[in-house]
Image: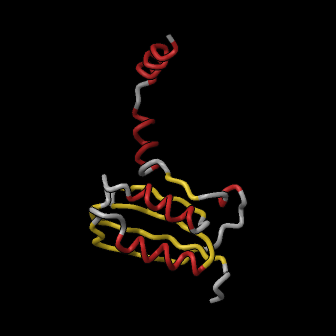
Amino acid sequence: MKNDAITRFIIEISGNMHRVGYRHYCLCKARDRNLKGFAMYTSGGIVIEVQGKITDLQDFINWCRKGPDGCIVEQFDLAEAPVHSNQRENQLFLVRTSDFKSYLKQVRMINKSSFFQFSSIITL
């Protein structure tokens, strides 16, 4: 693989990674290396999708294997994925809302009347 070749990886990490700033450090490390993608907590740990030059990715992946201070990585899975060519999705590295599917499920459970009562309180 060429050093300047653009590659995309999906990384799944489990262990003690909550409350140690893992996503924030991912964001900083990825942006320092001009990588694109996102980091998101899930019920099982963290999922990271990251894309960029293979030399920058290798350094980032090596950091992800150990994480920030206070983090305990118990399992680390890495898989190559198709490169995203959509410019909009690849502008920068983001921290996404934790476990987006669970988040949507919670939003759907909100009673509409209580939601409207809550939103009217906010607008006062």
- Nearer to me, 114 or 60: 60
- Nearer to me, 29 or 102: 29
The coloring applied to the image is secondary structure
Name the residue furthest top.
Answer: 124
Q: Quadrant of residue 67?
A: bottom left
- Nearer to me, 86 or 24: 24
Q: From this view, report whether residue 52 is shown above or below residue 4.
A: above
Which x, y percent locates residue 86? 71, 61
Number of marks in the rendered image? 0
Left-right relation of 38 to 16 = right
Left-right relation of 1 to 16 = right
Q: Residue at x 57, y 76 (%)?
A: 56
Name the residue furthest bottom.
Answer: 1
Q: Residue at x 44, y 15 (%)?
A: 117
Which x, y percent locates residue 37? 57, 62
Q: Quadrant of residue 76?
A: bottom left
Q: Quadrant of the N terminus?
A: bottom right
Left-right relation of 90 to 22 = right
Which x, y percent locates residue 68? 35, 64
Q: Quadrant of residue 90?
A: bottom right
- Nearer to me, 94 or 75: 94
Q: Residue at x 39, y 61 (%)?
A: 46
Q: From this view, report whether residue 92 is shown above or below residue 110.
A: below
Q: From this view, report whether residue 13 is shown above or below residue 55.
A: above
Which x, y percent locates residue 29? 50, 64
Q: Residue at x 57, y 58 (%)?
A: 93
